[in-house]
Amino acid sequence: MLRFVLFRLLHAIPLLIAIIFVILLMLQLIPGDPVQAMVGDFPVSPDFRAAITKQYHLDDPFFVRVYSYFLNLLHGDFGYSYQFQKPVLDLIVETAPRTILLTLVGFLIAIPVGVTIGVISGTTRNKAVDRFWTSATLIVYAIPTFWFGQLLVIVLAVHFGWFPTQGMGPLVSRAHGWSWLLERAHYIALPALAFAAYEGPRFARIMRTSVADTLGQGYIITARAKGLTRWAIIRGHVLRNSSLPLVTVVGYALGSALGGAVLLETVFTWPGLGLLLVQAVRVRDNMTVVGIVIFAALAIIVINLLVDLLYAALDPRIRTGS
Amino acid sequence: MSELAAPSAEPRPLARAWRNLRTAIGNIAHTRHGGAGCAILLLLALVAVFAPSIAPYDPLQQAQASLAPPSLENFFGTDNIGRDIFSLVIYGTRTSLVIGLGASFGALILGGTVGMFAGYFRGAVEAILMRVAELFQTLPVIVIVLLTVALFGSNFWLLLAAVILAIWPAEARLVYGQYIKLRRMDFVAAAKVADLSTAHIMLREILPSAIPPVIVQAALDASVAILIEASLGFLGLSDPNMVSWGQILHVAQDYMTVAWWTSFFPGAAICLAVVGLNLFADGLNEIVDPHLRGRGLQP
Amino acid sequence: MRATSVEGGPLLSVRNLKVHLRVGETLVRAVDGIDFAVGEGESIGIVGESGSGKSTLARAILKLLPNVELAAFEGEVHFRGIDLAGISERALRDLRRHRGFSMIFQDPLGYLNPTKRVGAQVAEAIGGESSTPVGDRVQKLLADAGLPSPSQVVRRFPHELSGGMRQRVMIAMALASEPVLLVADEPTTALDATVQLQVLETLRRLHRDRKMAMVIISHDLGVIAELCDRIYVMRAGKMVESGDTLEIFESPKHPYTAQLIALSTRRHAAPVGANGAFPSEASRPGAAR
């Protein structure tokens, strides 16, 4: 088990370093004025230019630049945003939790729904039922996330007026306690629903495949031979063994949630990391863009590592060794 | 593609592959999903090719009343500066198809080459190339594209390159797996004994057999590419000189509270293209990998 | 639904059973018109090479076929006079849970849930009410199946046990429902030679002590000869010969049977009756396989 952990670490660290290296290389290759490239659509005075050039080693060889960037990273310095006038890390710390909240609530919806559909689809003997759910999943999968978000707004928020159209909360909120919670829920409902539609189909598909695979195993025949009811077999053997792949998929999805967040936070003006990234790209604030991307890479690699460890801990075959 | 050789000569592997492909497409059309997929793609292709004849207005023309709901004059309504959305959607088909097919093809070439070398030569080549692929697969596709656009801009060709950069690893992985599997087969050993060149073995011998699942992935890549381009358009980050479905949705973002048609129709078009490609890929998959699946849980 | 056994009729009777499978494009006539019967407390063997359809037969009888496309399923299977073809799921489950039939399989590693402790899996199989706590009953079953230190085995996962121990766990699970009929599909094939003999001995003991009818399926005539009173020889989905063990060995009627005997006696001690009685030749120690 310990060897497994070390092995994965040994794999993850060079990957992270390589990603950062490639990104910095891309930065280096930008045509035109390197100072403007870093700072964005922001006018620079000659003094400022000199200061920036010195601070980021823009005149020095590439490797010096890389080295200094890594050093900064180790100190928690992800760069400085001249657009927002704040260190990039501060911006990230401010916005990332909102994205995480959105992701988690979205998963809270997506996982039970996805698992249920997957199990029904995989265990039913009725071809039509299976086909129905598979088609439904495929259709939801094919709907562009941002369009779905917009439709949710148009139908549920504008037409029926049941939900707010955007944001995390009203401009001024005077709610307390339970009503505060309700208000939060009210605002997060549509974005989370859209997020669930984005990740849910994948969970359903994985679950269905996993269930179908499990059903082909010998121990299911043994379970039938023991006279267990359908439900007892599903509960005691199918669910437990099919869930392992799902854990990995959910874990990885958590790491890559930024992909969906970028689009959905724009639709709903949800002030998270995704919206920040889009805004930074629009004004060419490359320091921030690079900072966010590297942060995302770090988060993904760490989360993937944790997921793999979790899987190893859950599967008795790996845990106790054979 | 004529076989002029003497009647006893074997058709070249490429000709063989081409014939297999034609039969395959015929087969696809007969599978349930594949048929529907083919129909949709054909429809889109026709719309794209005959756009000038089909679209009632010049898409960029701002004559009509702005934000007008769907009517007989404007089937899909108009946007905030009076452009006819129906025409925009028609012309947008061209952009999407070009990017979809272009990026898919590019990813096929880039990923395919990388996978081919990694799978055939193994060793250090394999290690390096596959690590690079893994690098690109770590980050979400849209994040990679956003990064590229932020740093290098977003004209059409850069956009295409950015999309290719984001989707090539999947193709590479696939081709890599195929080559690893196929290089150990007898016909490769025979080719080596016959002293055929490496290039010949890789391209003429192995490639035709490796192709089937690769094509499935290519179809899926095309749908991903269309989604990415639409996403960029939606974010307001694609080439402003292009007419694209995503860009209409960008406009819709500000007006969806008052003009649902600006969001509904372009989005439906994207959905249609993606569904068509996915169905097509499904049909392909059925042919390429027919497997026996049992039915559910019995008593 | 409890049925009393039909007076004088066999415990299990199979008539003209046909099971045809569709594998891809081909039609496989796995079982093509089979008749056989097992009496109460009897031990019969079904011998055939791989592909003869014997495993399919075993599963088809107990309605344990995996999820494959069935092109055809005809014939009659009666257990204690009850027609298994038409009974409800519930009745079938009852038969499997209590005083009906059980089955053990060739591949204990694949047929045990890798993520569940062995004790829990045996506990699942226990049907019927009793005042004894489940844990005790599980340990007793494991002991009956020949496992040493059952209290420790109970907490293990299948992959932590040896092949022989896993097979004994399967046996324990099968015994939990106090079956009157046990079907064993290649019970010793996946095991080492010495372990095979031990497991065979366990099966023989159980057959004797519990007066449990057994259907042993194997490609190995030696195994069948050790355990069974009567033998059916199966080939390509059909029965080619049947009869008492000794008769078959001494004077096989069908050339195929003769072939099988020749193949096996080259490697085995001479057959003994299922009751462990009369050897006809001096036994050679240590079967070399």
Image: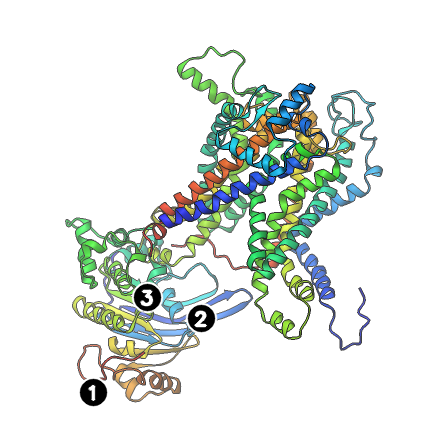
Sort mark 3 into few (<14), some (14-19) or many (20+) by Cα contacts within 10 Å.
Answer: some
Q: Position of residue A220 (x, y in %)?
A: 37, 55
Number of the label disc, if any, that sits on residue C282: 1
Of badges 2 and 1, nearer the viewer stands: 1
- Secondary element at tag 3: strand
CB atoms of marks 3 and 1 within 8 Å = no
Q: Quadrant of the N terminus of chain C?
A: bottom left
- For mark 3, name the chain: C
Image coordinates of residue A249 in percent, x first then y, are 48, 43
- Quarter of the rendering occupied by the C terminus of chain C: bottom left
**For the residues carrying marks 3 and 1, which lies nearer the camera in this image?**
1
Instruction: Say which residue label 2 marks.
Output: C30
3D distance between C-alphas at marks 2 and 1: 39 Å
> Please, is residue A117 above or below residue A183 in the view?
below
Residue at the (63%, 60%) spot, across then down: B210
> For the residues marked 2 and 3, what is the alpha-carbon distance in whole angstroms?
20 Å
